[in-house]
Image (cartoon, rainbow, N blue to C red):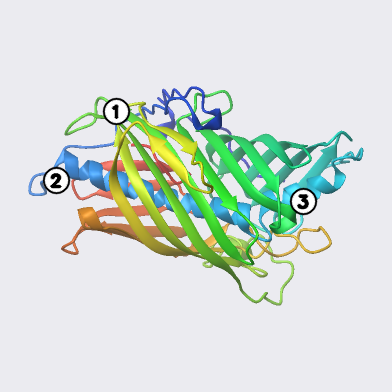
Amino acid sequence: MQKRVTYVTGLAMVAFAGVLSACSGGGGGSPVVSPAGGGATPTPSGAPVTSASIATQRNFSASALSAVGNGVDFDELSSPAGVSTFALERAKEIAHTRTTASGTPSCQNGVEFSQTSTGSGQVMQTIEFFYDSACTEPYKLLTRTITFTSTGGTAQGTEEDWDQSGNVVAYKTDSITFAFGLGHGGIGSIVDQRTIATAPGAPPFAQTGESCVLGGTNQIDCGAGNVLAISEPSASPSPISESIGFQGLVTGKFVTAAPSASPSPSASESTDAQGPGNWGAPNELQLQFNGAGYTGALGALTLAPAATPPAWTISGGQQILTLTGSGTLAFGGFGGHNSHGGWQGGDGAMSSLSLTLDDAADGLTIALTSSGNKLTGSVQNSKGQTVATISLDYSGTGTITYTSGALSIVKDWIILS
C-alpha cells in the first residue's frame, strides 16, 4: 500500500503566483513566485549583513543546490541503469507492436514499471520510484508518452516528487527530445525541458532543463540550467523582486560499488542511518561542476538549449557568479535494470552526497554533506566565517538560514525565497 499525502498548501506553498509563458523550446518569460510568510526577517542587532550580501548568498546557494538537483537528473539521463535511457530502450523494443499492460505493476526492488504500445510507434509508460525497496514510501512518479521517428523521437509527460515525509514537493511537466546514437540503449543524446508547479493545474514557478551527450563508457557529459523569479514585497529588511538563474556544464564518471549479499531488504532497512536505498550495487557519480549564476529584473530571464549541446544559455540578465567545484552522489542499490530487462540493482533514491563549490569572485564556499537521512551544510566567506547554514532531506526540501536571520525555503532543490 503506497503512502501518499495529498497536495499541501502550507509553508511556502500557499501564495504562489507563478507566471511562465511559452516555456517550450526554452522561450518565454520566467516564473514569478510569492511564497507566503516572506523569506527574510529583520537583521538582528550586532549582526549587520547588507541586503546585497544576502542576495549574493541566496543566489550562490540557489546555484549550488541546482547543481545537486541536476546531478540527480543526470543519473537518470546518463547512467547505464538510468530510468530515462532505460525506459526509452524498453519502449523502442515494443513501439511497433500492440502491447497492453495488465493489472497493477508489481514492486521490484523499489520500482514499479509498466508500459503500453499502440502499435504505431507510440508507447505510454508509468514508472514509480520509492525510498524503500518494498514500494511503500513514494519518491518519484513518471508518466510519459513516447513517440519514435526514424532518427529519435519525443516524449511528453509529468513527474510528481515526494519528500521523505510523504508530502508532495513538486509537480513537473516534461518535454523530451532524443536522438539515436551509440549511447546507453542506443540513445546518443537527450534533452529534457520542464516546468515545475506545486500541483496539477497550478501556475509553474520554475523552468529547468537538462541535456546529456551519451556514448562514452561510464562518462558524464551533461549540461543544465534553470530560471526562477522571486517576488516578496513584504520581505525585510528590503523587498525581494528579481529573477535568478543558473547554467553549467558537468563532467565526470560513474563508479559502481560491489553489491551486498542481501537481495531483498525490508522497508525498515532502507531508511536506516545509511539513507534511503542501502542494498545492491549503488551507482556513485563523481562530478566536476563549472557554472554561472545570473540575476535580472523580475520575469526577465529566459532559458534555452545552446547551439552546441549539452550547454544551456540564459539571457535577459547579467552574470554575477562563477562556480567551480566537485561532488560525489551515491544512489540506493535498488531500482536499476539488468540485461534481461528486469529491474534489479542500480539506481534508486539518492543515498549520500558530498559537494563543495566555490564562488571565487565573491569569496564564498559552500559545502554539503549527508548524515543519516539528512543533508547539512554551510556557506562560508573568504575569512572562513559561516554566513548561512543548510538543512535538507534527500528530496532537496528544507531551509537555508542566514546569519542575518533571513530564511530561504527550498523545495526539490529549488530555492523559493
Given residues 60 and 370, the one toward you in this image is: 60
Nearest to N terminus: mark 1 or mark 3: 3
Badge 1 density bin: few <14, some 14–19, many ≥20, Cα 10 Å: some
* Residue assigned mark 3: 89
Q: How many marks?
A: 3
Q: Nearer the viewer, residue 368 or 45?
A: 368
Whether residue 354 is visible to the viewer of this picture, yes or no, is no
Amino acid beneath label 1: Ala
Give the answer, above or below, for where 382 lies relative to 91. Answer: below
Report helix, strand or loop for mark 2: loop
Q: Name which residue lies at 64% across and 57% down.
A: 132
- Look at the numbered disc 1 and give the secondary structure of its residue: loop
Q: Residue at label 2?
A: 49
In the image, residue 233 sits, relative to residue 76, either above or below, namely above
Q: Quadrant of residue 300?
A: top left
- In the displayed structure, 33 sits above or below 154; it is above
Q: For the point 86% across and 44% down, which residue is it?
A: 94
Q: Is residue 9 left or right of residue 189?
A: left
Name which residue lies at 53% across and 45% down: 210
| Picture quadrant of residue 281 | bottom right
Quarter holding the C terminus? top left
- Left or right of residue 113: residue 321: left
On the image, which quarter does residue 299 sit in? top left
Q: Which residue is mark 1?
A: 297
Quote the CA–CA distance across marks 1 and 2. Answer: 23 Å
Q: Amino acid at mark 2?
A: Val
